[in-house]
């Protein structure tokens, strides 16, 4: 670079160095000295015009003075770029921006006069081009950074991204064209948006609709982002938003017919047509999702259904986008292309900073396996929560503050300035297309009514609402601008509103009579499919696949400690009747055979690559080079992709993400594993709002699998209990499956059954998986069981088949405690006790259980035995169902821990005491015997 090519502060620095060299050539390094010896500072019209040449009479003070001015000008430009947004007029209601002292010339020791004498080049960038002086360039800079847009990107650390943003802002190259046709088109769209709200307001006074008014530009912004991205080849736009403006977006962006929306306002469905018998509840109209029927141009647009829980939909939409951009057919890792998919999230200004799931979702944005090629965020910022003010809602300067930490560029824009809004929208999608990263538009407007239309906002915001009352709508404002400019005639704006009003009136007048409406019906799979699917795999095929999974690639060094396990795996299928298939082997073979059947698999969760208990090794790391090997992506029989990712340490967002992925790609098997099952309650919101109720509210058919380590082993209250009671509480109308299986073969068939049912009978599957039992001989199965068996929802006592009439007690239990019973000393002598395992807790296996109970006609009582306290585990769910099944033929007894607020003991020794007491009581006929004094175990007849 030539010395006189330096600009701004850099030029000032060069001049300062030059001055030092002039005073004392030895004070600069030899290279610099050589450069200065042949250089003369720039002359006429430049910053150094007044600088004397070397050897001239000393005017050092003047030069220092000039340098200070130059540095001051450059610093001022820098501050405007960094902090100009603080002085931008982004509030349509006219509040004063907070400003910043560094934005004044005086703060940098310069005056306007100084700036007028300095060259524009000091300011750099497009604003400096053709500017007569630094003053003019600075004025232009202020117009860019301190007008109705606040460009807030100084926190973007990557120079290429920051320079791109700076140039984009300052060049104005993304400003929308302002020819008459496009200006009128914006007015037409705003008229449509406004007419819709006004029509609803007039026709259904006081009915909640969460009007968009005050943020009307949201719709044209979405138009711009969607159409712009479609032009770049994006094929799927996935939108998530809460209540505010949702009906307007449904009508105008998702093309939901007015007739449907208006019918929902009339709420005409006669009570008799509601299908409560099928578990249908439906949902309020401002939570509904939609999908454009035909691609808009090249693009499908989907709006995810949304629960009332603000921001909960964020990770769901991001997961949907990930799935839409992922190609999963063909062996190996899945391939993701962010260019074909586009997530757009519309947030509330109180919810964005307040809800933790937002931060969790933003944290996914750059992670392998979760990245979407960039999410465009829009904060629909009406400067109020329900009634809460910004000061009560966030500690950051802006509602968008959180995004800064994730290096997401932010544009705050005044919602009353259509041009600025459309520029922000274009900037958003162009930035995403260029860098594949998130972008945030902080659309600052107001709320014309209360939180909802029946709410009185002036109870709490009297002053704001005095302003709002007389504030023109953005349509009115834009119409006035266009009429004043002569772009359109004065009679056009009212004609446009009338045109849209007429459409609504005609539609409303032609709505069907109330009695013709029928309630929606949730998906109903054919009954009994789950019991009919065949899941066995021929042994030869299993052996081939097992051998392929265990191939050692040339030059790959396995960790020494894993060698023995791999040798065991090689022998696992040799003898069909050996109990040689452990849990991890069964799982890997199940997944491999599913992949070989052509069904893609995505397995994510907390440290799933190795498994919390070091049992899985889905990824091998070369002990010497660290290179990774994923056998399920390599084995030649695979016909679909295997996606595998350790998740970040989040439950709420990661489960939401997998749910969304599953919704978008229902023909792929999606599994999420918890470190321990109890961590699932960090995602209780996702379970309640989406996974378990999505079917009843929105007709969704999720099939996500949850692997939840569960079982009482003395590790304390948390890690013992995956809280199956919570899942059972939400279980109704066959909305999920909950399984606690006890053998490797059962797990093998369960996973294969789930894959086989993806199309036929999809349901979320919760599996309570073992911990210490992973390597327990009792859990191991024979190869023959993989070939010939299937999943059994109830397993009768294997040892008591021969003389069932000798049984005088049936103990029903589920999961690991069955192994405690089977392996106990007491079992050897307790001939009259049959231990039967209820492997599927929900759907309640009434037929299979009835058959098992009928097998033991002489049993005098039936016991439900569980490790969990009485108010947890399956007991409270089982009790009424077992009572109904048993009738008054024999008593039902409960053995388990007594009611407690904490799931288990905090000490391993105390745990052992109680576990022993449980087992003892199972075998102690004539129950009622009291437990040891220090035991919490309860045994009672109910
Ligand atoms: C998780 C959650 N907590 C509380 C509420 C109750 N609530 C509904 S709307 C609202 C205010 C939201 O304010 P903001 O995010 O600014 O959106 P706005 O309604 O102003 O568009 C609140 C607190 C909710 N819906 N979800």
Image: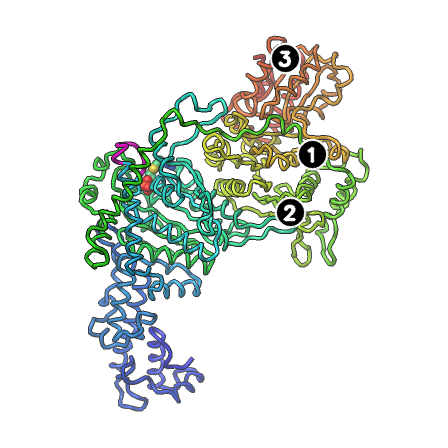
Residues 874 and 499: in front is 499
Residue at 35% x, 83% y is 18
Residues 101 and 541: in front is 541
Q: Is residue 370 left or right of residue 169?
A: right
Q: Is residue 924 magenta?
A: no
Residue at 23% x, 64% y is 104
Q: Is residue 206 magenta?
A: yes
In which image quadrant can residue 863 be found?
top right
Within 10 Å of disc 3 (Cα), the crowding (few <14, some 14-19, many 20+) is: some
Q: Is residue 333 left or right of residue 320?
A: right
Q: Is residue 823 above or below residue 326?
A: above
Please name which of the two marks, 3 or 2, marks the residue nearer to the observer.
2
- The residue where tag 3 is placed is 927
**Which percent across, then down, holds residue 773?**
67, 34
Magenta-colored span:
201-210
Along the polypeptide, which appears first: circle 2 or circle 1?
1
Q: Which quadrant holds the N terminus?
A: bottom left
**Which percent across, then down, holds residue 886?**
61, 13
**Which percent across, then down, holds residue 239?**
43, 45
Q: Are marks 2 and 1 in contact (CB under 8 Å)?
A: no
Residue 176's disc is none
Q: Which quadrant holds the C terminus?
A: top right
- The residue where tag 2 is placed is 640
- The residue where tag 1 is placed is 535
Residue at 41% x, 85% y is 35
Q: Hey, which residue is sitting farthest right in the picture?
A: 575
Q: CA distance from mark 3 to mark 2?
A: 54 Å
Total count of labels: 3
**Which percent across, then down, holds residue 828?**
75, 20
């Amino acid at each position: 670079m030539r010395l006189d090519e330096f600009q701004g502060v850099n030029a000032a620095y060069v001049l300062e160095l030059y001055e030092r060299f002039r005073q004392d050539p030895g004070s600069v390094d030899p290279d610099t000295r050589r450069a200065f010896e042949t250089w003369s500072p720039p002359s006429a019209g430049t910053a150094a015009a007044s600088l004397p040449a070397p050897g001239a009479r000393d005017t050092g003070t003047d030069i220092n003075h000039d340098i200070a001015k130059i540095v001051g000008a450059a610093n001022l430009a820098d501050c405007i770029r960094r902090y100009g947004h603080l002085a931008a007029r982004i509030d349509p209601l006219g509040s004063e921006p907070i400003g910043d002292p560094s934005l004044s010339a005086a703060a940098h020791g310069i005056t306007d006069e100084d700036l007028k004498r300095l060259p524009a080049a000091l300011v750099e960038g497009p604003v400096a081009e053709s500017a007569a002086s630094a003053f003019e360039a600075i004025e232009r800079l202020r117009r860019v950074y301190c007008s109705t847009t606040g460009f807030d990107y100084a926190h973007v650390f990557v120079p290429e991204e920051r320079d791109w943003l700076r140039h984009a802002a300052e060049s104005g190259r993304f400003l929308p064209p302002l020819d008459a046709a496009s200006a009128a088109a914006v007015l037409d769209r705003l008229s449509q948006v406004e007419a819709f709200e006004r029509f609803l307001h007039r026709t259904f006074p006081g009915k909640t609709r969460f009007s968009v008014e005050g943020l009307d530009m949201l719709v044209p912004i979405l138009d711009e982002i969607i159409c712009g991205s479609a032009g770049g080849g994006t094929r799927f736009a996935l939108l998530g938003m809460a209540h505010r403006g949702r009906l307007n977006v449904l009508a105008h962006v998702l093309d939901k017919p007015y007739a449907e929306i208006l019918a929902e306002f009339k709420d005409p469905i006669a009570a008799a047509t509601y299908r409560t018998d099928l578990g249908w509840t439906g949902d309020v109209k401002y939570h509904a999702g939609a999908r454009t029927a035909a691609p808009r141009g090249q693009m499908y647009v989907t709006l995810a259904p949304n629960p009332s829980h603000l921001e909960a939909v964020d990770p769901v939409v991001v997961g949907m986008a990930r799935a839409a951009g992922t190609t999963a057919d063909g062996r190996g890792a899945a391939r993701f292309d962010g260019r074909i998919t586009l997530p757009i999230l519309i947030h509330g200004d109180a919810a964005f900073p307040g809800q933790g799931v937002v931060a969790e979702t933003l944290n996914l944005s750059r992670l392998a396996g979760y990245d979407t090629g960039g999410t465009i965020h829009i904060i629909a910022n009406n400067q109020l929560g329900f009634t809460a003010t910004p000061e009560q809602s966030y500690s950051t300067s802006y509602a968008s503050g959180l995004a800064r930490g994730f290096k997401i560029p932010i544009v705050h824009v005044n919602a009353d300035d259509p041009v600025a809004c459309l520029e922000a929208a274009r900037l958003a999608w162009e930035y995403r297309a260029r860098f594949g990263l998130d972008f945030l538009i902080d659309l600052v407007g107001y709320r014309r009514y209360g939180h909802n239309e029946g709410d009185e906002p002036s109870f709490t915001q009297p002053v704001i609402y005095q302003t709002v009352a007389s504030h023109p709508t953005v349509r009115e404002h834009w119409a006035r601008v266009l009429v004043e400019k002569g772009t359109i005639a004065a009679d056009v704006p009212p004609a446009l509103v009338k045109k849209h009003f007429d459409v609504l009136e005609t539609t409303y007048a032609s709505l069907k009579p109330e009695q013709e409406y029928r309630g929606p019906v949730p998906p109903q799979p054919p009954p009994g499919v789950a019991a009919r699917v065949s899941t066995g795999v021929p042994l030869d095929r299993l052996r081939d696949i097992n051998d392929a999974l265990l191939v050692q690639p040339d030059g790959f060094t396995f960790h020494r400690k894993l060698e023995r396990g791999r040798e065991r795996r090689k022998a696992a299928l040799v003898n069909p009747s050996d109990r040689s298939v452990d849990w991890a082997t069964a799982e890997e073979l199940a997944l491999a055979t599913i992949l070989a059947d052509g069904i893609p698999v995505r397995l994510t969760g907390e440290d799933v690559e190795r498994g919390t208990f070091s049992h899985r090794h889905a990824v091998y790391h070369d002990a010497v080079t660290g290179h990774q090997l994923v056998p399920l992506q390599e084995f030649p029989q695979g016909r679909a992709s295997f996606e595998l990712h350790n998740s970040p340490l989040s439950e709420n967002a990661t489960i939401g993400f997998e749910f969304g992925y599953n919704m978008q790609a229902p023909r792929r098997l999606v599994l999420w594993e918890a470190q321990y099952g109890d961590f699932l309650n960090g995602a209780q919101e996702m379970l309640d709002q989406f996974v378990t109720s999505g079917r009843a509210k929105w007709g969704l058919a999720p099939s996500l699998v949850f692997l939840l380590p569960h079982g009482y082993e003395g590790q304390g209250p948390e890690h013992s209990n995956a809280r199956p009671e919570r899942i059972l509480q939400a279980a109704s109308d066959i909305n999920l499956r909950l399984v606690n299986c006890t053998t490797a073969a059962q797990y093998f068939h369960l996973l294969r059954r789930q894959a086989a049912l993806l199309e036929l009978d999809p349901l979320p599957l919760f599996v309570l998986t073992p911990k210490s039992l992973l390597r327990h001989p009792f859990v191991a199965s024979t190869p023959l069981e993989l070939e010939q068996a299937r999943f059994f929802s109830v397993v009768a006592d294997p040892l008591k088949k021969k003389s069932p009439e000798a049984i005088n007690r049936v103990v029903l239990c589920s999961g690991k405690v069955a192994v405690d019973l089977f392996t106990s000393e007491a079992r050897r002598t307790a001939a009259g006790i049959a231990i039967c395992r209820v492997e599927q807790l929900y759907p309640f296996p009434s037929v299979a259980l009835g058959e098992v109970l009928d097998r033991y006609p002489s049993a005098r009582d039936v016991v439900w035995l569980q490790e969990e306290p009485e108010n947890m585990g399956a007991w409270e769910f089982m009790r009424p169902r077992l009572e109904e099944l048993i009738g008054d033929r024999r008593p039902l007894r409960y053995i388990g821990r007594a009611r407690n607020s904490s799931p288990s003991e905090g000490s391993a020794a105390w745990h052992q005491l109680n576990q022993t007491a449980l087992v003892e009581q199972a075998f102690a006929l004539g129950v009622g015997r009291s437990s040891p004094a220090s035991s919490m175990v309860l045994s009672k007849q109910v």
